[in-house]
Image: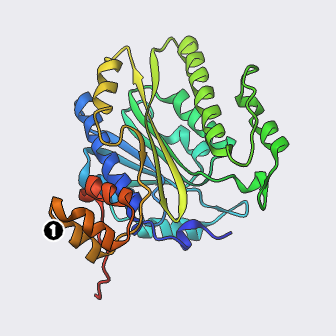
Amino acid sequence: MMNSYDTVNYKIRPQKQIERGLISQLVNTFSNFIGKRINYIGMGSLYFADFVFFNKNCTIDKMISIEKMMDNGEYNIQKEKRFNFNKPLSEIELIPKSVSEAIEDLPLSDNNFVWLDYDGQIEPYMINDLNEIIKKTLATSLIAITYNSGIASRYKSKQEIYIEKCEKEYRDFRTQDDTKKFDKDNYSELALEICEHYLMTKLQDYNNFYKRKMKFEKISNIKYQDGAKMNTIIWVLVDEAQLDSGLLIEKLRQCEISGDVNLTMQVLTLYEKQCLDRCNEKDKANLIKQMGIDQSTVDKYYKYSKYIPEYTEVYI
């Protein structure tokens, strides 16, 4: 089976790079509030772009990349060799397992930023992964998930959705009073809604059973599109026995990435960016008309310009 990193260079996705920049602000705000460096636990793929970026721009301690090394049900040693060969930083610890298998190896008693950066559509196994991480997290942490916002291929055929299969496989995550039905237009939104309600319910169970005081709060809902439509959800899991959750959440909500953030925009050429940069306010409307680009793209360019990368070809 072809892996996404064999066809997509994760270093040259402009909207993903804007997202990294915004997340770095959130991570640093979080780290400054708790007064210490935190660990980054992610899914670096073959390019480890997030790890390089966060190492340069955030106060990170340990770095751990989870990478499943299975192909068609069999362990692929060549894949593990390739990932280790491409590690850009010696500090990165590679765990060659799936997320569910790796959880026992993660330092979840520390303060972490855990980012389950999937490239596929949301599915029940992702909810289980999040649930296990929340169950075993013992210190205030940031937790995020990224997924493709389309319908998972196992639940559709062309433009049809297998509603009965969806309902059956999500049944264990739903309460009796949850009567919303899946359809081809709401799959991603409803799956996320089920996920969040389930995680909230399970966290309350864990608090009661383990005598903990953990609070789970959503901070960001990010949409972007470097080809496929993607969603990133970021939560903060706060140990209220150790920290003032209200004050921490207030600080995090002051970050640019807080709330609903839509990064989807037209890709601008270098010349278009230069024209926007040197344009004065009174000539801006006329320039935009000449350029033939959306006003929303212009607004997002000015808002996020410090995070927008410029790519060029270099001969070595």
- Return the residue nearer the eye: 73 or 142: 142
Q: Give the residue at mark 1.
A: 278
Tell me where residue 87 sits by quadrant.
bottom left
- Return the residue nearer the eye: 69 or 252: 252
Bin the neighbour count of mark 1 within 10 Å (Cα to Cα): few under 14, some 14-19, many 20 and up: few
| Relative side of 11 to 117, left or right | left
Q: Position of residue 303 (x, y in %)?
A: 27, 52
Q: Position of residue 78 (x, y in %)?
A: 57, 71
Q: Position of residue 231 (x, y in %)?
A: 51, 49
Asked if residue 260 is positioned above or below residue 279 in the image, the reply reads: above
- Return the residue nearer the eye: 63 or 44: 44
Residue at the spot 27% in from the left edge and 44% down from the top edge: 25
Q: Farthest residue in the bottom direction?
A: 315
| Relative side of 248 to 65, left or right | left
> Which color scheme is applied?
rainbow
Quadrant of the rendering where the N terminus is positioned: bottom right
Q: Secondary structure at mark 1?
A: helix
Tell me where residue 261 sits by quadrant.
top left
Residue at the spot 54% in from the left edge and 57% down from the top edge: 229
Residue at the spot 27% in from the left edge and 29% down from the top edge: 251
Quadrant of the rendering where the C terminus is positioned: bottom left
Tell me where residue 110 sits by quadrant.
top left
